[in-house]
C-alpha cells in the first residue's frame, strides 16, 4: 500500500509506531506530583499521532512543497511589497548574541543588542527625516495605532478635547479608518480627484477646530505620489491638527524623499516590507514609528538611548509617555534583519532599490495597458492598479483572471482593492524581480486576456491544476474549520 502523505498526520497514525527512543527517566515517574503541580497532571491518553521518523519527514516535506512562497515564485501582491528576503539577514539574526539573549538580562550583558537597536533607530530616523523613533510596534497596523495615540496624547496634553475627527483619503490603506476608530476618533473620508490625488479644495472645506489630524498613505494605494503633499500638510497644521504618514509604501521613495521634510509629524515604517525582513514568509513584522522633536515626550517607553557615548540604556523617563505598546522592546529579530539590510545596501543601495521598484512597476503597466483597463495612464511609483480586462464583450471578472493566473504558475495579484477602482487588479512587482520574470508574468496576463475572447469558459472554471479548485469563498470565510475532529483512540 502507498502511504498517502496528503492526509492529516493524525490519519497516518498507526498504534505502536514511533520515531524516537528516550533514555530511562531519572525522575520518579510514578510520583510526578512531587515535580509537577497536581492541577497540571492528567490520566487521560494524549492524542499524539504515532508515526515513524521517515513518515514524519515525508509528511511535512510534502506539505512544504505545496506552499507558494517568495523563495519559490513571483508574488505580485499590490500594497504588500512581497520581495525576496536576502539570506544574509537570516544568518545575522541567527547569531548567538542576537538569537539567544533574554529581555531581562542585565543591561551590561546586552550592550551589543542595545547598540544595534540604537543604530537602527538612527538609520530609520535619517531615511524618514524624523527626529526620534520608537521600535516597539509589532507591525504596520500596530504602528498606525501608535501614531494615532500620539496624536491623541498631544491634543489631550493641551486640554484640546474638542478635536475628535481624523481625516482619511479614500486612497489610504484599508486599516487606517479602523485604527482611527480604535483610538476613539470619528473618521472623515475625503474623496480623490480623477487624477487619484487628494482634492485640496474639498480638504479645505472639511478641516476645522475639531480636526485632530490626517492619515495619509504616500504614495497612495493607486501607486501615485501626491504632488500637493506640502499643501496638504500645511492645511492640516493651519487648522491645528497633526499629520500622520503611513509609510507602508516607503519602498517606492526611500532615498528620494523624506516625510519629515514634507511637513509630517508622525511616520511609521513596515520594516518587514521596506527593508526586506520576512514578509514573504507571512511574518512576523515590525512597525517603528518616528516623530518630530515636539512629540518625543509622548513616545511609548522604553526607548533606547546613549549615555556619554559609551553605553546604551533603556530610557523610561519620558514625561508625557502614554505607556508601553508592546511587551519588552519590540520584535528584536526583525530589527536585526532591518539593520543588516540597511548596512548591506548602504544609502546608495536603498535609493537604487526604490528606483528599480518604480521602473519595474511602470514597465508592467505600459506592457499591460493594451489588454487591460489602466484608469490612470501616467507615471506610477512602486505599484499600479488595473480595472479588469479591456474588452467588455465577455463576462470575465477580475476573480476569474486571478484564478486563471494560478494555472500559469504565478501567485495572483491583489484583487478588488482599492475599492475606488472597479474590478481592481493591484500589482506591485518590487525591485527584486528580473526582467525575465516580469515578462513571463506579463505574457501570462496577456494570454488570459486573449482567452477571455476565445474561450471564456476556461477562465470561469479556473484554476484547473491546483490541489484545490474554486472553493465557496463566502462559506470558507464564515464557516471556519480550524481543528482536527477525529479520535485516535476510538
Image (spheres, grey):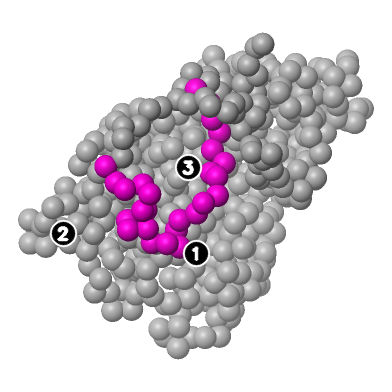
Dot 2 surroundings within 10 Å: few (below 14), some, or many (20 or more)? Answer: few
Q: Do the residues labelled 1 and 3 touch (CB within 8 Å)?
A: no
Q: In which quarter of the image is residue 372?
A: top right
Q: Mark 2 points at which residue?
A: 106
Q: Mark 1 points at which residue?
A: 145
Magenta range: 26-52
What's the CA distance linking mark 2 and mark 1?
Answer: 31 Å
The residue under the point 91% across, 27% down is 394
What's the CA distance linking mark 1 and mark 3?
Answer: 19 Å
Q: Which of marks 2 and 1 is nearer the N terminus?
A: 2
Dot 3 surroundings within 10 Å: few (below 14), some, or many (20 or more)? Answer: few
Q: State the SS at label 2.
A: loop
Residue 50 colored in magenta in the image? yes
- Location of residue 405 with respect to 27 vertically, above or below: above
Q: Which of marks 1 and 3 is nearer the N terminus?
A: 1
Q: Inspect this view and state whether residue 227 appears.
A: no
Q: State the SS at label 1.
A: helix
Give residue 283's mark.
Answer: 3
Q: Where is residue 405 in the image (x, y as percent from the top left)?
A: 71, 23
Dot 1 surroundings within 10 Å: few (below 14), some, or many (20 or more)? Answer: many
- Residue extending farthest to the top is 1
**Which of labels 1 and 3 is toward the front?**
3
Name the side, left or right, on which 461 lies relative to 305: right
Q: Where is residue 380 in the image (x, y as percent from the top left)?
A: 57, 37
Give residue 212's mark.
Answer: none
Q: Is the magenta stretch mostly helix, strand or loop?
A: loop
**Which of labels 3 and 2 is toward the front?**
2
Amino acid at each position: 500500500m502507498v502511504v498517502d502523505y496528503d492526509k492529516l498526520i493524525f490519519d497516518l497514525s498507526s498504534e505502536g509506531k514511533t520515531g524516537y527512543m528516550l533514555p530511562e527517566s531519572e525522575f520518579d515517574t510514578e510520583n510526578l506530583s512531587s515535580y509537577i503541580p497536581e492541577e497540571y497532571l492528567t490520566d487521560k491518553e494524549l492524542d499524539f499521532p504515532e508515526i515513524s521518523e521517515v513518515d514524519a519527514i515525508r509528511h511535512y516535506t510534502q506539505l512544504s512543497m505545496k506552499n507558494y512562497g517568495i523563495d519559490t515564485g513571483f508574488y505580485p501582491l499590490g500594497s504588500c511589497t512581497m520581495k525576496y528576503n536576502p539570506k544574509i539577514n537570516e544568518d545575522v539574526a541567527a547569531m548567538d548574541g542576537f538569537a539567544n539573549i533574554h529581555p531581562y538580562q542585565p543591561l551590561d550583558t546586552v550592550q551589543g543588542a542595545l547598540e544595534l537597536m540604537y543604530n537602527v533607530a538612527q538609520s530609520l530616523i535619517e531615511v524618514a527625516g524624523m527626529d526620534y523613533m520608537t521600535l516597539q510596534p509589532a507591525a504596520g497596523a500596530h504602528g498606525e495605532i501608535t501614531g494615532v495615540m500620539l496624536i491623541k496624547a498631544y491634543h489631550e496634553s493641551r486640554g484640546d478635547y474638542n478635536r475628535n475627527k481624523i481625516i482619511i483619503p479614500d486612497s489610504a490603506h484599508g486599516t487606517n479608518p479602523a485604527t482611527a476608530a480604535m483610538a476613539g476618533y470619528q473618521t472623515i473620508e475625503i474623496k480623490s480627484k480623477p487624477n487619484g490625488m487628494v482634492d485640496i479644495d474639498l480638504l479645505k472645506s472639511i478641516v476645522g477646530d475639531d480636526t485632530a489630524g490626517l492619515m495619509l498613505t504616500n504614495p497612495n494605494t493607486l501607486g501615485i505620489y501626491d504632488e500637493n503633499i506640502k499643501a496638504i500638510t500645511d492645511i492640516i497644521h493651519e487648522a491645528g491638527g497633526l499629520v500622520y504618514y503611513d509609510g507602508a509604501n516607503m519602498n517606492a521613495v526611500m532615498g528620494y524623499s523624506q516625510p519629515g521634510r514634507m511637513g509630517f509629524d508622525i511616520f511609521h515604517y513596515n520594516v518587514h516590507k521596506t527593508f526586506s525582513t520576512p514578509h514573504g514568509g507571512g511574518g512576523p513584522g515590525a512597525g517603528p514609528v518616528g516623530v518630530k522633536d515636539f512629540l518625543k515626550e509622548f513616545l511609548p517607553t522604553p526607548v533606547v538611548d546613549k549615555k556619554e557615548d559609551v553605553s546604551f540604556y533603556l530610557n523610561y523617563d519620558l514625561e508625557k509617555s502614554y505607556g508601553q505598546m508592546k511587551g519588552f522592546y519590540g520584535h528584536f529579530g526583525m530589527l536585526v534583519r532591518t539593520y543588516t539590510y540597511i548596512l548591506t545596501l548602504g544609502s546608495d543601495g536603498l535609493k537604487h532599490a526604490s528606483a528599480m521598484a518604480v521602473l519595474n512597476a511602470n514597465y508592467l503597466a505600459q506592457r499591460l495597458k493594451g489588454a487591460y483597463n489602466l484608469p490612470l495612464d501616467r507615471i506610477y511609483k512602486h505599484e499600479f492598479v488595473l480595472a479588469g480586462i479591456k474588452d467588455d464583450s465577455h463576462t470575465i471578472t477580475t476573480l476569474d483572471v486571478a484564478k486563471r493566473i494560478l494555472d500559469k504558475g504565478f501567485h495572483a495579484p491583489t484583487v478588488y482593492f482599492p475599492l475606488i477602482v472597479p474590478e481592481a487588479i493591484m500589482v506591485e512587482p518590487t525591485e527584486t524581480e528580473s526582467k525575465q520574470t516580469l515578462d513571463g508574468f506579463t505574457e501570462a496576463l496577456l494570454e488570459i486576456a486573449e482567452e477571455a475572447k476565445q474561450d471564456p469558459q476556461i477562465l470561469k472554471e479556473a484554476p484547473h491544476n491546483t490541489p484545490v479548485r474554486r472553493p465557496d469563498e463566502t462559506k470558507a470565510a464564515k464557516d471556519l474549520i480550524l481543528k482536527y475532529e477525529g479520535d485516535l483512540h476510538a
